[in-house]
Amino acid sequence: MYQVITPTSERDWQTYFDLRYRVLREPFQRPRGSEQDEYDQVGLHRMVVNDAGTAVAIGRLHFNSPDEGQIRFMASAPEHRGEGHGVAIVHALEQLARHEGAKHIVINSRDNTLGFYQKCGYQLVEEADTVANPTAEHQLRKLLTEHNRIIYRPDWCQELQATWHEDIPISETMGIRISQYTGREFETHALLSRNINVHGTMFAGSIYSLATLTCWGLLHLQLRERKLEGAVVLADGNIHYHKPITREPRAIAKVLDMNGDLSSLQRGVNARVNLKSQVFDGNKPVAEFIGQFVVLAKKD
């Protein structure tokens, strides 16, 4: 179990700076103390910790001006890379920047992390000469707009939502929108006012549709992540309704809950995947959907 927290205690700060030094300074034989600077006192810090309270990813936001935030000292523990913790840190820091009224964020990045930030919607604005200086840093920039509130693959999510509204008209009628994608989790929401029944709660069929489409969307994005092609169709689905929905509904599907082998698509063979989503009334899960999906392989 991992969570994003703000370091506050002495132990929090110790594990925070230990990770920063281990990843960003020790490999370059820099001395202890070099992992800190004068902006640490005024910056906003976030860290992902495990159940033991140990930092597995960290990052800091400070402001160069009222309009410009800067993310620095991003680090993920090598043994936890690829688990989505870096995205969680960027997302948390971007939310802080938006809340403080920043118009854009800048990040300096070496070659090995450039692709990661570009997947998070950052644009390369100043390319460093890493041939002459392998440790030189590129500068990236991201305007904070409504479109790129989606932290990971915002362009893909925009295309997916447009596809839903064009090819599945009921999704637009229901007011279904993509809320967030982190590479590990996919979240959608719908308008209660467009899906209300005679009891003043959300229509059961609408809950089913939202839950199904959320699984479908995550699977579609995962195919793109893995550079695979295929048409996603629902083969079977079951939903359990625990309580009625009285507030704006949202649904979440996680890669962790996806079971199946997609590699057969590379051989032109259909793939079968089981996937789960939960529908929430506010912060309370009130319905659980389990779907069996078939990905139809693209034929030559």
Image (spheres, helix red, strand yellow):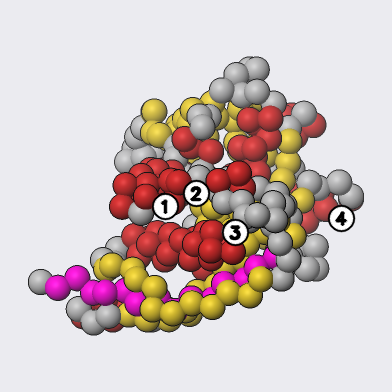
Q: Main secondary structure of the magenta part?
A: strand
Q: Would you say the residues marked 2 and 3 are in contact, meaning their CB atoms lie under 8 Å apart?
A: no
Task: Give the mark nearest the N terminus, 4 or 3.
Answer: 4
Residue 292's place in the image compared with 208, above or below, is: below
- Disc 3 and disc 1: Cα gap in Å? 14 Å
- Kindly report which numbered mark, 2 or 4, lies closer to the viewer in this rendering: 2
Does the magenta segment cover residue 37?
no
Residue 109 image position (x, y, % from top left): 48, 40
Q: Residue 205 versus residue 4: which sits nearer the camera?
A: 205
Q: Are marks 1 and 2 in contact (CB under 8 Å)?
A: yes
Which amino acid type corresponds to the residue marked 4 in the rendered image? Arg
Looking at the image, tell me whether mark 4 or mark 1 is earlier in sequence order: 4
SS state under label 3:
loop
Name the residue that disc number 4 marks: 11
Q: CA distance from mark 2 to mark 3?
A: 11 Å
The residue that mark 1 highlights is 170
